[in-house]
Amino acid sequence: MEEKPLISVCIVTYRHKDYIGKCLDSILSQKGNFSLEILLHDDASTDGSQEIIRSYQEKYPEILFPILQTENQYSQGKRNITGIFNFPRAKGEFVTVIDGDDFYLREDKLERQMEALQREEEAVLCFHPAKILLSDVREGPKDLLRPYSEGKILEGRELLNHPKGIAFSSMFFRRSLIEKLPDFYYACPVGDRPIELMAALAGKAVYLPEEYTAYRFHLQSSWTEREKGRQQQEKYLSEMKHCYKLFLEESRGKYRSEVEETVKRLSFSVALNLRDFSEIYRKDYRAYLQEMSFRERVLLRLEQYCPKFYRFLQKSFGMERKY
């Protein structure tokens, strides 16, 4: 009888030739008392990613199970690739996700998250902060993907509305969470948020304060590049609102006030991304502005009233927009 793995690691790749090797090495080097499987989906990369993946499959045929597409599925309207192609194959008691251009920082990442869920029986999700990399040698803002300063147990409603993001690669959850994916999962334009929403309905979550993964920011194949521009941002906001509408229908109105606050915060974030200053400084958005540091608020005003000087500072000192 075939022994099932304890952990299923789900990877999605597209044009990650320069990064997928480091991603796979960081997973294969994990230490702990568990067996794992790596379920990988490559969306018809033409940059050499698939050749690298095949070489790893030859070395680890009992661990790595790739799907190497010849036609791009995302362009055919299949949005949440992980849910369509990887989740149905997962056999582990626990499942985790990662993009092929990200990687693990510590060899005990999977063990620590597994132990956290084994300790907290009511928890269905475990996550942690991530280190942002603007390049191989340059780090990004330290708190952008750090939602909390200390470890904690979260109630479901706390997963709906938080000021900082949760890294996709930090999510580690029970397979029972994804055995039946709801409509709002497939309606969501991103893969991480619906996992949070499902967890909010299923139980509690554990937050570990240590950084266990690295997230590459501002890469050409990343979400931030693909979704640039007013039209794309507005489309994203519209699709997220539809996702939350389906979530409320699925949950029969549970967490309605939290969802309304989340949509409001999201609208502020889109205005911030677009530098729509008339929206950013609305009275009902003041609380969100106060969550930004004093330095960030000063730079935002500088960008509003002295854009040429702000661009000069960006060019001279390599300043990156945090939002």
Image (cartoon, grey):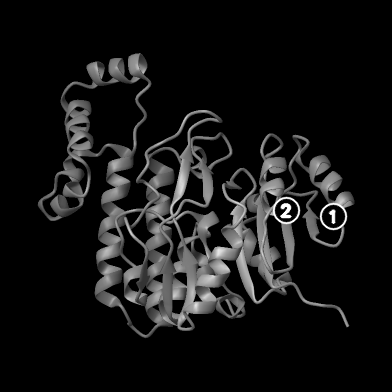
Which class describes the residues within 10 Å of circle 2: few (<14), some (14-19), or many (20+)? some
Amino acid type for the residue under numbered disc 1 = Tyr
**Residue 298, relative to residue 146: is it above or below?**
above
**Marks 2 and 1 in Cβ contact (< 8 Å):** yes
Which class describes the residues within 10 Å of circle 1: few (<14), some (14-19), or many (20+)? some
**Front residue of 83 and 134:** 134
**Residue 184, relative to residue 38: is it above or below?**
below
- Whether residue 176 sits left or right of residue 203 in the image: it is right
**Residue 214, relative to residue 191: is it above or below?**
above
- On residue 88, which mark appears? none
Residue annotated with mark 1: 60
| Element type where label 2 sits in the image | helix
Q: CA distance from mark 2 to mark 1?
A: 9 Å
Give how far across and how far down residue 28 sits, in percent.
73, 53
Give how far across and how far down residue 106 sits, in percent.
58, 50
Q: Is residue 184 visible?
A: no
Q: Residue at x 34, y 32 (%)?
A: 321
Amino acid type for the residue under numbered disc 2 = Leu
Tell me which label, 2 or 1, sits earlier in the chain.
2
**Quadrant of the image containing the C terminus:** top left
Give how far across and how far down residue 135 sits, in percent.
52, 30
**Quadrant of the image containing the N terminus:** bottom right
Residue annotated with mark 2: 28
Classify residue 299 by image quadrant: top left
Q: Is residue 8 visible?
A: yes
Q: Residue at x 49, y 63 (%)?
A: 188
